[in-house]
Image: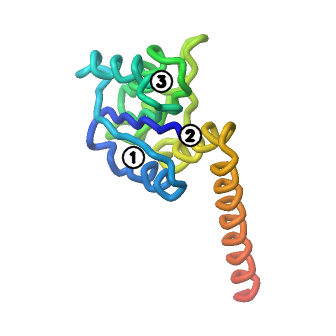
Amino acid sequence: MKRVGIVMGSDSDLPVIKKAADQLTALGIPFEIHVYSAHRTPAEARDFALNARGNGFGVIIAAAGMAAHLAGAIAANTTLPVIGIPCQGPVMDGLDALLSTVQMPTGIPVATVAVNGGANAALLAAQILAVEDAELAAKLDAKRAKDAAAVLEKDKGIAERL
């Protein structure tokens, strides 16, 4: 199975990345996590992206706040799918990071999840990998069914209380 590469611009993004790591672990997907900044360590971020396919990665998740250029910088240096997680920072509640992540020029796509959407980034990465992995696709189907059952159980509980 291909691995998921996870890059965060700062260790302050770790709470968001932990949600992604937890989802990947639950699905049995191998991953690797790094801290590389698009601005402070651009050479390392570029090298990671350039070598990702050769190093066994199938998808890259990039999380950053504030200027949030990391996902775009990674995507500029690989043709692997890149999923951006805009992280909430002290400015504009993460809107600045969201806009920086989604405003990519034609030819350099970045899939973007919600602000602080670590769990969804991992699930999207899993769905991408599951295109060619029937076992992983079955795990995702089972998770969806379990999640649906939990909602229906809550619905039943509400009906009983009212």
Q: How far across and down, in percent of the image, does residue 45 sit?
A: 33, 22
Q: Residue at x 35, y 23 (%)?
A: 48
For residue 125, the mark is 2
Q: How far across and down, in percent of the image, does residue 33 sit?
A: 35, 40
Asked which quadrant contains residue 66, the reply is top left
Residue type of the residue flagged with mark 1: Ile
Q: Residue at x 58, y 20 (%)?
A: 109
Q: Which residue was labeled with disc 1? A: 17
Q: How far across and down, in percent of the image, does residue 3 sit?
A: 47, 38
Classify residue 146 as left or right of residue 30.
right
* 60 relative to 48, above or below: below
Which colour style is shown?
Answer: rainbow
Q: Residues within 10 Å of mark 1 (few under 14, many from 20)?
A: many
Q: Which residue was labeled with disc 3? A: 53
- Is the Cβ of the residue at disc 3 closer than 8 Å to that at disc 2? no
Q: Earlier in the sequence, mark 1 or mark 2?
A: 1
Residue type of the residue flagged with mark 3: Arg
Q: Earlier in the sequence, mark 3 or mark 2?
A: 3
